[in-house]
Image (cartoon, rainbow, N blue to C red):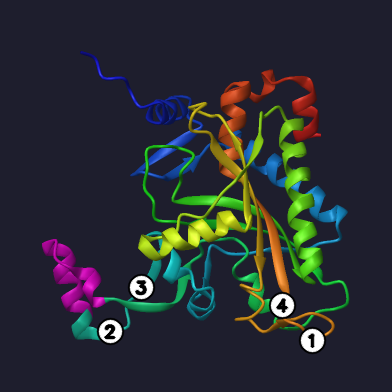
C-alpha cells in the first residue's frame, strides 16, 4: 500500500525545485531567491504603510537580543524548547589548542564555549520594551518593529521556519488603548490580507506553552481572549496556518521593564504581528510561483 506523502514536505520540495527557497541542509533554515525576497519585501511594505498611518516610530531590530532583556521577558519559563542561546569562546591558548583538537577528532568542542551576552531573538518586539523604560508621553506610543526571529522547532513544513521574518505594529501605553489597538488591528490585518487574495479567518489562539504549567497558561490565555490568529489554508483546510496574530499583553512587559503611562501607572502593551515568510508562501500557493502572472489587483496592492 502506498503511503500518502506529507503535503508540507511536498510543498517544500516544490519550492526547492522552483528555486524559490534553497536548502541549507537544516530543516527550517533556508536561502531565499530574489523572487521570494521581492514578495517578502512587498509584504513588509504593506505593514510599513500601516505604521506610517498611525504615526509609529520605525525600529529595525537585529535577530539577537541582550540576555538580560531575554531573562526579563520570562520566555524561558514558558518556551524552553524554542530557545536559542549564543555561546562564545573565552579561553586562552591552551583552551584553543584543545578546542581545535576536539573539532578535528569530532569531539565535544561546544563544551568549551560559554554563554555570551546575547540570545537569538524569539520575537521581533522583545528588544523594544527596555527602550520604552520610564514614563511615556500622554496617549502612549506606537512602534513599527521588524526583524528576523529564531525558534528551535525544526520541521519539513516550509511555513515553520527556525529563522523567519516578523513585522509588528506595537502600542505601549494606556490599558484601554492597548485593548483597542489589539481589537482594531485584528480587523485591519485581516482586511489587508484579504485584499491580497488570501482567505483568512480569525480564531482564538494560545501560545505553545511548555509542559504541565504551560497547559494552564494556555487555557488561561484562551479563557481571557488575549490572543487571536489570522489563519489561512496552505496545505490543509483542516489544519490552517497562522499568518498573523493580535495579542494583548496587559502589563506583561510594562512591569518588568519599568514602563509607565503618563500618569505613572504600569503601562500595558498590545501588538499585531505578521509572519512575513508565512504570508509570502501563502501567496505563492494561492496565486502561483510566478508573481508576474498574479491577478492585477493583487499585484497593484503589493508592488505599486
- The quarter holding residue 62 reads bottom right
How many residues crowd mark 3 within 10 Å: few (<14), some (14–19), many (20+)? some
301 with respect to 64 (left or right): right
For marks 1 and 2, the one nearer the N-term is 2
Residue 102 drawn in magenta: yes
Nearer the observer: mark 3 or 1; the answer is 1
Tell me the residue that label 3 is attached to.
87
Q: Identify the residue at the far top of this view.
A: 1
Residue 80 visible in rendering:
no
Residue 17 visible in rendering:
yes
267 with respect to 15 (left or right): right
Nearer the observer: mark 3 or 2; the answer is 3
Q: Residue 138 in the image: state x and y as whole percent.
A: 88, 77
Disc 4 vs disc 3: Cβ atoms closer than 8 Å?
Answer: no
For marks 3 and 1, the one nearer the N-term is 3
Disc 3 vs disc 2: Cβ atoms closer than 8 Å?
Answer: no
How many residues crowd mark 2 within 10 Å: few (<14), some (14–19), many (20+)? some
Tell me the residue that label 4 is attached to.
132
Q: Is residue 120 above or below residue 207?
A: below
Under circle 4, the secondary element is loop
Provide the residue span drawn in magenta.
Answer: 96-112
Q: Residue 206 in the image: state x and y as whole percent.
A: 53, 53
Q: Identify the residue at the far left of this view.
A: 105
Which residue occupies 69% across, 41% down?
43
Spatial separation of the CA atoms under disc 3 and disc 1: 39 Å
Residue 15 drawn in magenta: no
Nearer the observer: mark 4 or 2; the answer is 4
Spatial separation of the CA atoms under disc 4 and disc 1: 14 Å
Disc number placed over residue 91 in the picture, else none = 2
Main SS class of the magenta portion in the image:
helix
Tell me the residue that label 1 is attached to.
264
Amino acid at each position: 500500500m502506498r503511503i500518502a506523502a506529507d503535503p508540507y514536505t511536498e510543498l517544500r520540495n516544490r519550492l526547492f525545485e522552483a528555486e524559490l527557497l534553497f536548502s541549507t541542509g537544516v530543516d527550517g533554515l533556508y536561502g531565499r531567491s530574489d523572487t521570494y525576497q521581492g514578495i517578502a519585501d512587498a509584504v513588509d511594505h504593506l505593514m510599513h504603510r500601516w505604521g506610517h498611518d498611525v504615526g509609529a516610530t520605525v525600529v529595525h531590530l537585529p535577530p539577537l537580543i541582550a540576555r538580560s532583556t531575554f531573562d526579563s521577558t520570562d520566555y524561558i519559563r514558558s518556551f524552553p524548547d524554542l530557545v536559542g542561546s549564543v555561546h562564545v569562546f573565552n579561553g586562552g591558548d591552551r583552551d584553543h589548542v584543545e578546542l581545535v583538537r576536539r573539532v578535528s577528532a569530532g569531539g565535544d568542542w561546544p563544551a568549551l564555549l560559554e554563554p555570551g551576552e546575547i540570545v537569538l531573538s524569539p520575537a521581533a518586539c522583545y528588544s523594544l520594551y527596555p527602550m520604552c523604560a520610564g514614563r511615556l508621553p500622554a496617549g502612549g506610543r506606537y512602534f513599527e518593529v521588524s526583524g528576523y526571529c529564531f525558534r528551535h522547532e525544526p520541521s519539513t513544513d516550509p511555513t515553520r521556519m527556525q529563522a523567519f521574518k516578523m513585522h509588528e505594529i506595537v502600542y505601549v501605553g494606556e490599558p484601554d488603548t492597548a485593548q483597542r489597538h489589539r481589537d482594531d488591528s485584528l480587523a485591519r490585518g485581516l482586511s489587508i490580507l484579504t485584499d491580497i487574495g488570501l482567505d483568512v479567518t480569525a480564531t482564538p489562539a494560545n501560545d505553545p506553552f511548555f509542559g504541565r504549567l504551560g497547559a494552564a497558561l494556555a487555557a488561561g490565555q484562551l479563557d481571557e481572549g488575549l490572543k487571536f490568529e489570522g489563519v489561512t489554508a496552505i496545505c490543509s483546510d483542516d489544519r490552517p496556518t497562522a499568518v498573523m496574530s493580535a495579542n494583548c499583553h496587559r502589563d506583561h512587559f510594562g512591569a518588568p521593564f519599568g514602563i509607565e503611562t503618563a500618569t505613572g501607572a504600569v503601562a500595558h502593551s498590545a501588538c499585531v504581528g505578521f509572519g512575513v515568510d508565512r504570508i509570502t508562501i501563502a501567496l505563492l500557493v494561492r496565486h502561483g510561483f510566478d508573481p508576474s502572472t498574479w491577478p492585477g489587483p493583487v499585484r497593484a496592492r503589493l508592488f505599486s
